[in-house]
Amino acid sequence: GAGVSQSPRYKVTKRGQDVALRCDPISGHVSLYWYRQALGQGPEFLTYFNYEAQQDKSGLPNDRFSAERPEGSISTLTIQRTEQRDSAMYRCASSLGGFGDEQYFGPGTRLTVT
Amino acid sequence: GIQVEQSPPDLILQEGANSTLRCNFSDSVNNLQWFHQNPWGQLINLFYIPSGTKQNGRLSATTVATERYSLLYISSSQTTDSGVYFCAVNWGSQGNLIFGKGTKLSVKP
């Protein structure tokens, strides 16, 4: 079946602009996670949802970052007033159940802030 | 918080060679996953292995939870095995995975 999809795959934006990154999880998966990966590093946790409820947003670096999953399926990660330090690969993952289940990752969105 | 350490950080092999990658973690974990990040940036699931041994073709993995480590074995390596191998754990009451820094593998023809 279809895996996790993300769009856009690449995004170049100017400093100060807002961006919205989309994640479409595997059908039927309850939990959805957002991670950010800098070059040469492993992914780092940003936030996660069970159904439409945001369970943990402790990894969001500051209040310019927000996420939602209003109908318990597709999720959007929004970065307001982008800065060059926001440039990274943003990855989304989903799991069938919650806590402890195997997570499957999408292809990521490569964000470049100029 | 939990620490996840992978070794070696870099590994260069000739095609056909075998290798062992190691992941140490500092506390009890709920689950452990191995991933392969290929040169195109895709993060591919290899194993979901909180304990025990699993095999998939030329790859196998063993997690000894009581001693807090996991090993990934790659036999008869191929150039397509090149990339970065990540170990990631789920720990405590958190839902997210915590990743190690990865092992960068280069397989030469």
Image: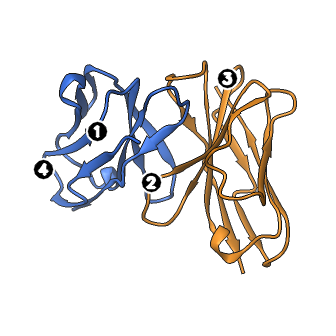
Alpha-carbon neighbours of circle 2 within 10 Å: few (<14), some, or many (≥20)? many
From the image, state whether disc 1 or disc 4 is nearer to you.
1
Residue at 72 percent across and 24 percent down: it is A27
Residue B33 placement: quadrant: top left
Label 4: which secondary element: loop
Q: CA distance from mark 1 to mark 4?
A: 27 Å
Alpha-carbon neighbours of circle 3 within 10 Å: few (<14), some, or many (≥20)? some
Give, as a three-letter code, the residue at label 1: Phe
Q: What color does chain A have in the rendering?
A: orange
- The residue wearing badge 2 is A42
Res. B17 mark: 4
Res. B90 mark: none
Answer with mark 3 or mark 2, whichever residue precedes in sequence: 3
Mark 1–mark 4 CB contact (< 8 Å): no
Tell me the chain of label 2. Answer: A
* Image quarter in which the N terminus of chain B is found: top left
Q: Are marks 1 and 4 on the same chain?
A: yes
- Name the spot of residue A100 as percent of width and height, x first: 49, 23
- The residue wearing badge 3 is A29
Give, as a three-letter code, the residue at label 3: His
> Is residue B39 or residue B89 the one in the foreground?
B89
Label 1: which secondary element: strand
> Is residue A99 or residue B36 the one in the foreground?
A99
Mark 3–mark 2 CB contact (< 8 Å): no
- Name the spot of residue A64 as percent of width and height, x first: 78, 60
Give, as a three-letter code, the residue at label 2: Gly
* Image quarter in which the C terminus of chain B is found: bottom left
Q: What color does chain B have in the rendering?
A: blue
Q: CA distance from mark 1 to mark 3?
A: 28 Å
- The residue wearing badge 1 is B25
Label 2: which secondary element: loop
Tell me the chain of label 4. Answer: B
